[in-house]
Image (cartoon, rainbow, N blue to C red):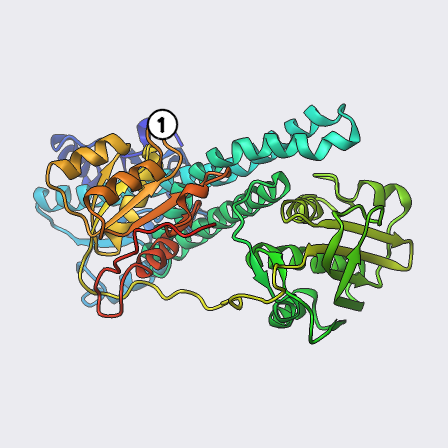
Amino acid sequence: MIPQHSERALILAPQGRDATVALAMLAEAGLRGAIVESVPELVALLSEGAGFALVTEEALAGADLTALAGWINDQSEWSDFPFVLLTQRGGGIERNPAAARYLQLLGNVTFLERPFHPTTLVSFARAAIRGRRRQYEARARLEELHALATGLEQRVEERTAEHRAAVAQLHEAQKLETLGQLTGGVAHDFNNLLTPIMGALDMLQRKYGESDARSSRLIDNALQSAERAKTLVQRLLGFARRQTLETKAVDLGGLIDGMRDLIASSIGPEIDLRIRHGADLPAAVADPNQLELAVLNLCVNARDAMSGNGTLTIVVDQLAFGPGSQPRLTPGLYVRLSVIDTGCGMDADTLARAVEPFYSTKETGRGTGLGLSMVHGLAAQLGGGFALSSELERGTRADLYLRVAEGGVAHDAVDRRRQPLLAKGRPLSVLLVDDEELVRVGTAEMIRDLGHEVTHASGGAEALARLDAGLRPDVVITDYKMPRMDGAELARRVRDTLPQVPILLITGYTGTTENTHHLPRLPKPFGQAEIAAALAGLIEPDNKVVRLSTGRRRP
């Protein structure tokens, strides 16, 4: 498309003076136009760009319209080119049934009866160009969002590839730790980039997904790319051993029983799933959400190794380790979670590299090579261990060792229910604090779209200044990692003056945040549904703001 032609009018009126008169009327109104002599010439010029086409009914009658129909059907998904059809016997289908067939051919067509007043033609022309401009704007927005989402995934892959090259020459014992430090260092920036992308796509999908099938398909593609990038960042955090863990005493037998349906649907009906564990197993120290992800990773790897059929066995038992035991663990009591498959197995060389980051024997596009690295990093962060054993054609066994919890009794069971979205009710006044403008603006739009009033600040000092000036929000939402004053310090100072105001911490930070354990948290990246659920957690059923305790609970 030639940019200077994007808003011109193409006039096809080969008989009489209609073309000359119409061109003069448009020119007097400041609109550019060009006269074409035939349907083939019209199709050729449409490919160069136009704002709309003005066509007479007799110009189409008896002409070969195959090329024109093909151009209309082959338009990009964002495009719905406007036509103005000058009719002979009426301005619409009701008065001119012969023109009805052109409606199906042209699609986005407006009928204009001759003779017409110049003002009417100019009005039709400007309306068509306005519609075409909106199509151009939609194209630009969708292409930008799609490029951001897909480009981010490429950036993640390029950066992690650079990390791999940086540690390739290091000693084997240093490889995992070194790459973990590098990947964890950039995860915060990736999370901040993903947040406005996913939020904007989420809102666009909710607004246009049902009404515009073409836009919905483009947004779906961009969302899928963003979700893949989000998964890749989470796996990098798992390998880096820097994801925030909420450890507790967990009943592993109960956790695996609760995952039975999820595992079965993930591995498929052709694989026989068997689960064995004792009834009196002690609780283990773990983060149930991260552990579920690790178990699911191991089960999916086992499924792929079995090529769709075989037996997958999950066993949970208790072991005691002393000095010098294998694998090398701190002496004490452990709960062992084993995932055993009857797949193709691995040779010695493959087994030796299995937990290396980005090492994968799967075909391109089937995995990132970070699954086992994530499980290895999680086990180390929990103070346990991870071991693999395998033989070719005999299958693989993955053993995850977790320390027995003090007292050996599980705390709260894993709650798998999705938190309900915030119900319609009293609008809230929200103070939003984030030093990243893209995150701040995107999050504010998501919250406003939920019906709440948002005042935003670019840092802790600006937020406190607004409070000193008299702002009294119902809820404060703050990022954690900010220059000069982080979210923990801001929360402490807000509590000093407004102790009853709930504070929600949103963060993509991957380091230690022990001084914020008393605050509700929402990890980045998130979409509109997640921020709505987080706000719902601060609201009682009668739409009153929950007054949180100002005391700090011990980690």
> Residue at horizontal 26%, vertical 56%?
450
The number of numbered badges drawn on the structure is 1
Kindly indicate the quadrant of the structure image that contains residue 399: bottom right
Point out residue 28 in the picture as x, y percentages from the top left corner.
Answer: 11, 31
Residue at 28%, 64% (x, y): give it.
98
Compare residues 129 and 372 and report the one nearer the observer: 372
Residue 88 position (above or below residue 492): below
- Dot 1: element: loop
Q: Residue 491: percent from the left, percent from the top?
A: 30, 42
Q: Which residue is mark 1?
A: 483
Q: Is residue 13 in sight in this rendering?
A: no
In the shown orientation, is residue 274 left or right of residue 209? right
Which residue is more in the foreground, 72 or 517?
517
Q: Find residue 181 and report its horizontal and vertical position in percent.
A: 60, 31
Q: Residues within 10 Å of mark 1 (few under 14, many from 20)?
A: few
Residue 214 visible in the shown view: yes
Determine whether 229 is above or below 276 in the image: above
In the image shown, does 211 or 386 lie closer to the viewer? 386
Quadrant position of the N terminus in the picture: top left
On screen, 1 above or below 376?
above
- Please indicate whether residue 124 sits to the left or right of residue 307 in the image: left
Q: Quadrant of residue 166?
A: top right
- Give the amino acid at mark 1: Pro
In the image: residue 404, left or right of residue 14: right
* Picture coordinates of residue 361, whole percent (x, y): 78, 45
Left or right of 250 in this view: 359: right
Residue found 19% across the figure and 43% down from its top: 497
